[in-house]
Image (cartoon, rainbow, N blue to C red):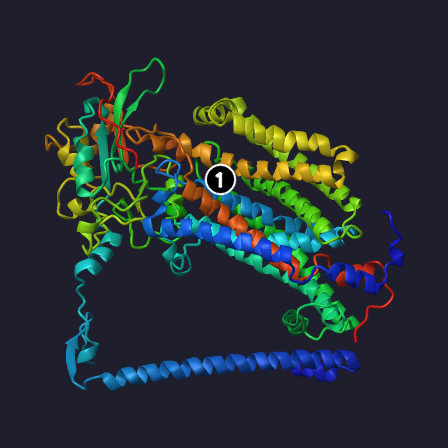
Amino acid sequence: MTMDDNKLTFEKITADLTHHIRINKGFVIWMGFLTVSLLACLFAYSLQLRTGLGVAGIRDYVTWGLYLSNFVFFVAASLIGMLVSAVLGLIGMKWITPITRIAETIAVAFAAVAGLVIVSDMGRPERLAYVFIYGRPQSPILWDVTVIVTYFVLSLMLLYLPLIADMAIIHNSKVAIPSWLRSIYKRFSLNFTDSPEQNRIINRSIRVLLILLVPAALSIHTVTSWLFAVTSRAGWDSSIFGPYFVSGAFVAGSAAVIIAMFFFRKNYKLENYLTDLHFNNMGKVLATVSLVYLYFNINEYLVPGYKLKRADAVHLQELLAGRDALLFWMVQIGGLVIPILFLLFRRFRKPVPVLVISIAVLIAAWFKRYLIVIPTQEHPFLPIQHVPQNFVHYSPTLIESMITIAPFILVLIIITLISKFFPVIPLHETAVEKGAEHIRFE
Amino acid sequence: MEENNTTNFSNEDEKSKGSTRRNFLKNLGLAGVGVATGAAALYSGHIFEAKKEATGESKVLLTQDGKLVSVDSLEIKSHIKTGEELRESQGREGIPGRRWVMVTDLSHCRNARKCINACQDAHQLRPEQYHMNTLQMQDAPNTAPYNMPKNCQHCDNPPCVAVCPVDATFKRPDGIVLIENDRCIGCRFCMAACPYSARIFNWIEPKDAASHQGQDYNVELNVPQKLGTISKCLFSADRLREGKLPYCVEACPNGVYYFGDENEDAVTNGTTKETVRLSKLLRDNGGYQLMPELGTRPRVYYLPPKNRLFPFEEAKDATPEKV
C-alpha cells in the first residue's frame, strides 16, 4: 500500500466513500440505457406470454435451453456473497472489509433475479402460485424455491445490517446527499448512535447471519445441481454434481466481484480503499477456486470417459470432438486452464490484467452452464426420430436471447441503484479499522 | 418462570435487559391473542351468517350406519358427482381392481404407423407430437435392425411423477401414469427425468385449439390439449373405462399389441382379439422391459424381434414440418 493509513481522518474517509452518492449525468444516461434495453426485452417476453414457449428454440428433446442454463448461472453468481463474507470473513481475513458490500450486492441482485429467470422458463407462469398451493416436498423444485428464498433473505439482511451504522453516520454528517435519501437513511438507521450495546447487537447478528449463510448458500447450488443429477441421463447422472456446481459457482462469483471492484474503484475514485492488494488477493482467490473447479472437471469427464458406457460415450464424443467441441475446449482451456496459469504470477494479479482474466472467466462460466444443460438433452437414451430438424438440434431464437439478456439488465439495474445510493465500501467498519480517532455523531 | 427469573436479577443491566425481553414477549403474546380472537370472531360470524340462511325446513335422513338424523334441507348435498368433477376424481382414482399392462410384439411390427395416427386423432395431436412413436432400432453393428413402437412405459417407479412439483402428473392404483393439464405449470422437469423421451409439450397453440374452445377437460383423454402443458400416452384410460382396448392397440393391423390386466394374468391382442395368459406369453417369447437397469419398473413389455413377419425397411414417411 502506498499511503499511510493512519493519516486518514474520519472526515476524509466519509467524504471519500460518499462523494458518489448523488444523481449525476452519467448515472441518468446509464439508467436510461438500462431501462430502454429492459423494456425491449420485456416486449420480447410479452410475445412469449401471449403465444407460448414456442417462440423460443426449445422443443421436445432439448426442453431446457438458455433460460435454464441462465438460471444456473444466476444462482452460481449469487454464491459469492457466501464465499467472501462468510468463508473468508469467519476465518478472520481482514483485507475483505472493503469488498464485503460489493459481494453482498452481487449476491442479492443475482439471487433476486434468479427467481424471475426460472419463471420465464415456465409454460404456465400464471400458475406459479400452484407451487405453493399444491407443492410436493418430493420435488427438488420445492427445495430450490425454499433455499433460494432463504438465501436471498439472509443476504439482504447481511447487506442491510452493516449499512445501519453507515446510514446513521451519513445522515448525521454534513455530506451533501439528496434530501429524500437523507430521510430514508434516517428511518432505516434505526436511531443508531454507535453505542457499545448497539454495536454489540449488530456484530452478533452479523455473525449469526454469516454462520447461517454457509449452509444456505451450499444448499442453493447443490439443490440446483440436483435438478439435473436426480435424472438418469448421461452427463447429468453424476454423484459429484453438488460440489462440482458449488466450486464452479465460486469461480463465476469471484470473477464478477473482481469486475465490479475494478469498475467502482475507477468510477467512484476508490483507489485508496480498493488497492492493488485487494486485486492481488482476489486474484489468488480466483486461482484457488478455479483449481478446485478444474479438479472436479477432471473427475466429471475422465471417470465416465474411461468406462465409456454407451450413453456416456455418445455424450463425451459430442462434447470433446463433436458438435460442441469448439465451445467445450474454449471454455475449459480459455476459461479455466489459461486463467489459472496466468493468475499464478503476481504481475497478472494487478488490477487491469486480473480484470481481463475475470471477464474471460465470467463469459466462459456462462457458456459452461450452457454445455452442462443442453448437450445432454440432444442425445437421450432412445433415438430421436420422425420429428422436425429443429427438434433434433437446439438453436436459440432472437426472442429467446432477448428474454435471456433481460435478467442481466435487471441485475445491473439493482447493482447500480444499490451502489449509487449507498456507500460501496462499508464506512463505519473502514473508519474503525483505519483507526480514525472519533466517529462523530451530532 | 420468566417472571421469577427477571425479578431475581440484581444486576441493573441484566434487569433492564430481562424486562425488555419480558415486554417483548408480552407484546408478542398480546399480538398473538389479538390475532386469534379476531380469527375466532370472523369464523363465528361466518357460522352465524351461514345459520341465518338456513331455511328451517329439516329433513329426516337415514345415515350409512342406520341412524335417523334430521338435517336442514340446505345442508343436503348430492353425493353423486357429475361432469368434469366426476371425471377428475375418477381420473385420479383409476379403475378399481385393475393393473393395466401392455405387451408389444416386435416381430410383428412393420412400421405401418396406424397406431400413431389413431392416437394422434384421439388426443388432438399435431403430426410431430407423439404419444406413440415407432423407432427404427439397431442394438449393435452386427445385429438386425427392427421397428420398435415406443410409448409411455407407465413405470411403477416413475421418475417423472417423483419430480413433479405440483402433483400434476400422478400414478394411479391401476398402474396408469396420468397428467392433469389444468394443474401443470409447464416446468418440464418430468420431460428431463423421463429416460424414455415419452413426454411431449404443447410449445404452440394445440391443434385446432379454437374449435375445442369450451370443451370440458377430460383427464383420462387429456383433451383439449392446453398450451404450455405436458402431454403423453395415457394407455387410453378413457377407453379402458368403457371396457375397450386402447386406440393404438385397436388400430394396429399387424397384431403387434396385447393389452390387459396383470391381476387377471390375461392380455388381448388388438388385431386378432385373441386373449392369452400374460405370464405364458412373456415366458414363451422371452418378454423383456426397456432399460430395466434404471429401476423404473415399466408396465410395457416387449417381445423380441425374432422370426419376423416382415422384412425391415427404412422408414419412408416424411418428417413433419418445422414448428
Asked whether the viewer can see residue A230, the reply is no
The percent position of residue B97, horizontal first and vertical second, equals 21, 48
Q: Quarter holding the N terminus of chain B?
A: bottom right
Name which residue lies at 77% across and 59% down: A16
Name which residue lies at 24% across and 52% down: B91
Q: Mark 1 points at which residue?
A: A229
Q: Give the side of residue A85 with respect to residue A28, left or right.
A: right
Asked whether the viewer can see residue A7, the reply is yes
**In the image, is residue A441 above or below residue B83?**
below
Q: Give the side of residue B168 with respect to residue B77, left or right.
A: right
Amino acid residing under circle 1: Ala
Q: Which of A380 and A136 is in front in this view?
A: A380
Within-10-Å neighbours for mark 1: few <14, some 14–19, many 20+: many
Name which residue lies at 57% across and 78% down: B28
Q: Nearer the viewer, residue B47 or A346?
A: A346
**In the image, is residue A225 above or below residue B310?**
below
Name which residue lies at 30% across and 28% down: A385
- Element on which disc 1 rests: helix
The percent position of residue A84, horizontal first and vertical second, equals 69, 50
Q: Give the side of residue B231 with respect to residue B193, left or right.
A: left
Instruction: Report the residue that reaches farthest toward the front.
Output: A25
The percent position of residue A344, horizontal first and vertical second, equals 75, 33
